Amino acid sequence: MTVPLLSASALGFSTAAGEPILQDISLDISVGDRLAIIGPNGAGKTTLLRLLSGMALPGAGSVSLLGRPIAAMPPSERARIVAVVGQSDQPDRRIEVRDYVELGRIPHAGRLSRSAHAALVSEALERTGLVALANREMGSLSGGERQRAQIARALAQEPRILFLDEPTNHLDPRARGTLLELVAELDLTVIAVLHDLHLVPRFATQVAVLQHGGLVAYGPAPEALSRATVRSVFGIDLLRLPHPHEDREITVFDIPLTTDIGANHP
Ligand SMILES: Nc1ncnc2c1ncn2[C@@H]1O[C@H](COP(=O)(O)OP(=O)(O)OP(=O)(O)O)[C@@H](O)[C@H]1O
């Protein structure tokens, strides 16, 4: 039997005050999978991403990376396998884009020549379309450009698994598709928290649906994103319709407008 790249078994996590946030989450990630973690606000998505990437330790259960407990792995070794683009990353505003992307090489310091490190940084800038901005300060970038720079830094890290927490939240609709297309073409294993459900069937090979800290659906996309699941978890209607001009189906989410804030959490 092949060992999964990443495996989570019966994960649980509670706050310091004992409030449970995640319960009994088990997942297996194989090489080349692109897992979308979805769920309403507060469902526990970011917490799960932090546990799976080894940034936080679970209160119950375990995560293994390449068959070894991630909790016992030295951070420097983990950083050569796992790259994380988080929501709360606050790059120094004055650092230039190229220097920021070069930070991704830190886990590999001393393992290659200077010119080989520089070539990998250049490649990451090229793949993310940032060559023209390489000498700009991070603080001068738009939200979308900064997001691409964060992905470039993660690529420079040459990870086996890329973790993304809402990578499209600053992007306009077209740029969202472009960024996920870029990520899908990287030939990497990816675990991404996504809010934009439209992008899930196009981007993900697997879907994990969280609600109130539990895994309510998990499996290959798009099957795991069923109409019944979307209705019960998000309170909206999923419709798969024939495209009016092309020979394919499109997925449409019918989102009711409501003033009831609790409606977001069926
Ligand atoms: N350190 C903490 N102390 C107390 N509560 C926490 C802590 N971290 C997370 N929580 C709570 O746990 C729940 C899950 O948080 P998490 O950020 O994982 O959710 P999420 O699904 O990523 O939400 P969103 O979609 O809004 O980003 C939330 O109710 C949050 O307030």
Image (cartoon, helix red, strand yellow):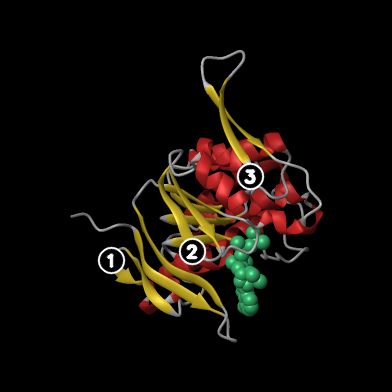
Q: What whole-number distance in Å separates the C-alpha atoms at marks 2 and 3?
A: 20 Å
Disc 1 from disc 3: Cα separation: 32 Å
Quadrant of the drawing holding the C terminus: bottom right
Direction from residue 177 to residue 29 in the image, left or right: left
Earlier residue among tags 2 and 3: 3
x and y percentages locating residue 3 in the rendered image: 25, 58
For the residue marked with disc 2, what is the amino acid?
Gly
Marks 2 & 1, CB-CB < 8 Å contact: no
Regarding residue 86, the answer to whether it shows in the image is no
Mark in the foreground, 2 or 1: 2
For marks 2 and 1, the one nearer the N-term is: 1
Q: Which mark is residue 214?
A: 2
> Which label was assigned to residue 67?
1
Left or right of residue 183: residue 77: left
Query: At x 78% / y 49%, what residue is drawn?
Result: 142
Q: Is residue 75 left or right of residue 66?
A: right
Q: Which mark is residue 196?
A: 3
Give the spatial CA distance, label 2 vs label 1: 24 Å
Q: Secondary structure at mark 3?
A: loop
Q: Quadrant of ligand 1?
A: bottom right
Query: Residue at left 63%, top 64%?
Result: 42
Res 32 visible: yes
Image position, residue 170 (x, y; %): 73, 49
- Residue sitting nearer the eye, 14 or 53: 14
The residue depicted at 69 percent of the width and 50 percent of the height is 169
Asked whether the beta carbons under mark 1 and mark 3 sit within 8 Å of each other, the answer is no
- The secondary structure type at the circle numbered 1 is loop
Mark 1 vs mark 3: in front = 3
Please state the horizontal and vertical placement of residue 113, each as a whole percent of the image: 45, 59
Q: Residue 108 versus residue 77: which sits nearer the camera?
A: 77
